């Protein structure tokens, strides 16, 4: 599994209905993209749920790294670059994935939190604790999917959770999910992946 996200921050007065319409008219195009585990089409709106910005920020879990490459070099991503400029694409090695009790419900939100590993911390110990936290989270009512990934360049963990509700009390940045493409969730594996 490989996690990926890019965030397009938009002007404060940007009409977010443009993004909503874009996702409504184009989101289905990845509903059967080979090698994609899932894509959560996420947005944040300035002043809603504490967001300081308007932002379009889809989050991906890839079952196949070659599929990620096909997407980034293909027509779909060319459309993003054409309309918004080429965004920085963050990507992480997958460490853990599990569907939750609400996996059959459409997700309404996702949360994303980044955790930097302390310089003197034992990475394996920190990651083992983080995985245990996700194992517990995966049994929580309202959880659609939870995943953990690692950026070994910066020694950061990214915690990603899809929720079937507004995720009150969840730690991290909160995004509204406009659409979920999930053609290959069964190929993502479940549980610890290291």
Image (cartoon, rainbow, N blue to C red):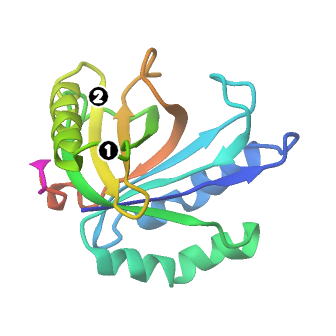
Boundaries of the magenta span: 190-194
Count of number-bearing discs: 2
First of labels 1, 2 by sequence position: 1
Q: Position of residue 71 (x, y in %)?
A: 45, 76
**Residue 120's disc number:** 1
Q: Position of residue 9 (x, y in %)?
A: 72, 51
The Cα atoms of the two marked residues, 1 and 2, are separated by 33 Å
Q: Is residue 164 left or right of residue 12?
A: left
Q: Quadrant of the N terminus?
A: bottom left
Mark 1 neighbour density, 10 Å: few (under 14) some (14–19) many (20 or more): few
Residue located at (24% from left, 48% from top) = 123
Is disc 1 placed on a helix, strand or loop? loop
Q: Residue furthest front?
A: 120
Q: Quadrant of the C terminus?
A: bottom left
Please state which of residues 53 and 103 is positioned toward the viewer in this rendering: 53
Task: Name above or below for residue 107 compared with residue 81.
Answer: above
* Residue that label 2 marks: 143
Residue located at (27% from left, 39% from top) = 145
Q: Position of residue 116 (x, y in %)?
A: 42, 44
Query: Disc 1 vs disc 2: Cβ atoms closer than 8 Å?
Result: no
Is disc 2 placed on a helix, strand or loop? strand
Task: Name above or below for residue 47 compared with residue 130.
Answer: above
Residue located at (41% from left, 80% from top) = 69
Query: Is 24 one of the magenta-colored residues?
Result: no
């Amino acid at each position: 599994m490989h996690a990926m996200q890019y965030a397009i921050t938009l002007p404060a007065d940007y009409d977010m209905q443009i993004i909503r319409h874009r996702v409504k008219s184009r989101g289905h195009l990845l509903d059967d993209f080979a090698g994609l585990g899932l894509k959560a089409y996420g947005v944040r709106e300035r002043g809603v749920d504490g967001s300081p910005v308007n932002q379009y920020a889809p989050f991906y879990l890839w079952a196949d790294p070659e599929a990620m490459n096909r997407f980034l070099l293909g027509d779909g991503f060319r459309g993003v670059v054409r309309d918004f400029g080429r965004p920085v694409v963050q990507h992480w090695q997958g460490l853990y994935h599990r569907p939750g009790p609400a996996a059959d419900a459409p997700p309404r939100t996702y949360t994303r939190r980044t955790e930097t590993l302390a310089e003197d911390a034992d990475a394996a110990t920190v990651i083992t604790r983080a995985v245990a936290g996700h194992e517990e989270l995966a049994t929580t009512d309202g959880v659609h999917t939870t995943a953990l990934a690692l950026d070994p360049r910066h020694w950061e963990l990214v915690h990603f959770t899809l929720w079937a509700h507004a995720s009150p009390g969840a730690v991290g940045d909160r995004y509204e999910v406009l659409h979920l493409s999930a053609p290959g969730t069964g190929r993502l594996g479940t549980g610890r992946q290291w």
